[in-house]
Image: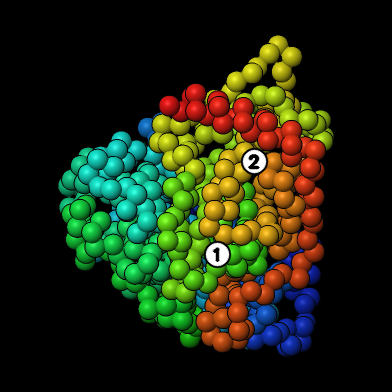
């Protein structure tokens, strides 16, 4: 296996060695190890009983999915597992001065992954990610075979290659022998549970993102399972609730003696954890996140809407809370692509700050489309180029186009919830104040930048603290300083016209 390590500079290492044990004597207990298993990195840190990160305990191990020409998006199963193990190793090594017991371990993971496991517990070589589109032809087969509107309202998921139904139908048809050898069909976090606890348990949160789960009854959807000819025994058991906990098996209890007595909570979805960490757990607050991809989500206590808007998905945080929103396949990944291919000048953002709308029409579908059209064949495109167009113009139109897609999600969300505040997070937005301002102007709403740098980690820690009764509710907001991007009404009016051009171009290209 590949080993993922970390390094401390000589100065940082010496500072860490000089920390007195007494500095940790007053830590608010219980101590919690939080792990965030994302698509582009694995993060981990220790949090105290007030969901505050303990300095100098955080670790970040970067990675990326392998992309293939035929639409594949994969992560090596064993390397992905080893990364989580290495992250835990690193946190424990960095926190040796802390003598207080780590009582709990909580985690969140990326939604929509799929990995098969044989009877010996060995995984398929690769984890299929949400961006794997090789099963896209099978969404049409599903639409002909089943009533998509009814399935969407039960499972909260449209027929799309992001979800399990299309992927499983693809595997059954094109890889029948490999599929026949499967003894389990898991999300990556379920496989992680199998390796650490000898129990491939899944949470309601993770199961709800598969597209195979009844979000109203909180069980695997029997009608869909039967229609896809899936043996129920292949699906992981669902944890009783967020309060259910597990213990390490002998192998990992020996590897991590400090965690041998810790209680491990079922892994929740990173999107749900991000909402919690950003303080967006009521119907009046929306979380807008741009990392590699993008999403706008509203989480609240209660049941799913009676009718889920066709362009949105609806999953669960847990048995009491739902989370509804939309996801964009292109976010920070699109920005990285622009930087790599356009040779943008260093002052590109300064050039486009406070400009009028670009006048160009850009479709941000380099990685395909999810919300709101769910068009499997959508591709990136651009209209309106002239000899005077430069790379800064193209950058501006691309950033605007993502904002326009968020506006589509916002409009549909507004039909089921009354959003009073939008809280933004994600590395891509923190690095681009210009992009955050564009989004505020397009939406015509102020954008509050979440000051907490690790919303998902903090969210997982908060949910764990609520589960053990340490805090009453997860509605605690971060004390970190927040920046507000105030929407410009004049620019909002201009962007309404630009958005109409974007919509017409979308209809023209994606017939």
How many numbered circles are shown?
2
Alpha-carbon span between mark 2 and mark 1: 21 Å
The quadrant holding residue 284 is bottom right
Q: Is residue 315 left or right of residue 199?
A: right
234 to the left or right of 106: left
Label 2: how many Cα within 10 Å (few below 14, some 14–19, many 20+): many
Q: Which residue is mark 2?
A: 403
Picture coordinates of residue 375, whole percent (x, y): 42, 36
What residue does disc 1 label?
Answer: 299
- Quadrant showing the C terminus: top left
The percent position of residue 258, horizontal first and vertical second, equals 53, 81
Is disc 2 placed on a helix, strand or loop?
helix
* Residue 324: image location, x then y, percent: 50, 58
Residue at point 46% right, 61% down? Answer: 305
The residue under the point 73% across, 56% down is 449
The 10 Å Cα crowd at callout 1, few under 14, some 14 to 19, many 20 or more, is many
Q: Which mark is residue 395?
A: none
- Asked if residue 447 shows in the view, the reply is yes
Is 326 drawn above or below residue 54 in the view shown? Answer: above
Q: Is residue 190 visible?
A: no
């Amino acid at each position: 296996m590949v080993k993922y390590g970390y390094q401390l500079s000589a100065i940082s290492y010496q500072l860490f060695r000089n920390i007195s044990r007494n500095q940790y004597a007053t830590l608010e207990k219980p101590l919690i190890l939080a792990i965030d298993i994302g698509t582009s990195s694995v993060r981990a840190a220790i949090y105290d009983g007030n969901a505050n990160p303990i300095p100098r305990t955080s670790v970040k191990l970067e990675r990326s999915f392998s992309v293939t020409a035929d639409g594949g998006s994969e992560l090596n199963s064993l390397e992905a597992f080893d990364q989580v193990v290495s992250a835990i190793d690193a946190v424990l090594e960095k926190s040796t001065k802390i003598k207080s017991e780590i009582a709990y371990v909580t985690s969140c993971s990326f939604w929509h992954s799929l990995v098969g496991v044989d009877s010996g517990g060995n995984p398929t070589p690769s984890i299929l990610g949400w961006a794997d589109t090789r099963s896209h032809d099978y969404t049409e087969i599903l639409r002909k075979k089943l009533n998509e509107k009814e399935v969407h309202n039960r499972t909260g998921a449209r027929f799309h290659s992001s979800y399990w139904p299309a992927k499983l139908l693809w595997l059954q048809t094109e890889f029948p022998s490999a599929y026949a050898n499967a003894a389990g069909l898991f999300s990556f976090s379920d496989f992680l549970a199998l390796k650490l606890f000898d129990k491939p348990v899944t949470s309601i949160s993770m199961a709800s993102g598969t597209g195979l789960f009844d979000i109203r009854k909180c069980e695997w959807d029997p009608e869909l399972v039967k229609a896809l000819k899936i043996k129920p025994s292949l699906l992981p058991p669902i944890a009783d609730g967020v309060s259910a906990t597990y213990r390490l098996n002998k192998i990992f209890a020996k590897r991590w003696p400090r965690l041998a007595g810790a209680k491990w909570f079922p892994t929740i979805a990173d999107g749900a954890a991000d909402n919690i960490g950003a303080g967006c757990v009521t119907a009046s607050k929306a979380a807008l996140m741009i990392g590699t991809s993008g999403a706008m989500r509203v989480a609240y206590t209660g049941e799913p809407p009676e009718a889920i808007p066709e362009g949105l998905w609806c999953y669960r945080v847990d048995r009491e809370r739902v989370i509804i929103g939309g996801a964009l396949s292109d976010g920070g990944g699109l920005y990285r692509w622009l930087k790599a291919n356009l040779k943008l000048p260093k002052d590109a953002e300064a050039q486009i700050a406070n400009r009028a709308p670009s006048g160009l029409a850009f479709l941000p579908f380099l990685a395909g489309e999810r919300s709101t059209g769910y068009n499997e064949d959508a591709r990136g495109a651009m209209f309106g180029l002239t000899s005077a167009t430069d790379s800064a113009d193209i950058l501006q139109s691309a950033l605007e186009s993502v904002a326009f897609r968020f506006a589509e999600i916002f409009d549909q969300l507004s039909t089921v919830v009354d959003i009073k505040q939008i809280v933004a997070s994600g590395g891509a937005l923190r690095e681009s104040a210009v992009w955050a301002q564009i989004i505020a102007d397009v939406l015509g709403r102020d954008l509050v930048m979440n000051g907490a740098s690790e919303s998902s980690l903090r969210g997982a820690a908060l949910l764990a603290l609520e589960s053990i009764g340490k805090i009453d509710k997860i509605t605690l907001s971060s004390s970190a300083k927040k920046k507000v991007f105030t929407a410009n009404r004049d620019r909002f009016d201009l962007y309404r016209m630009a958005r109409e051009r974007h919509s017409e171009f979308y209809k023209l290209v994606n017939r």
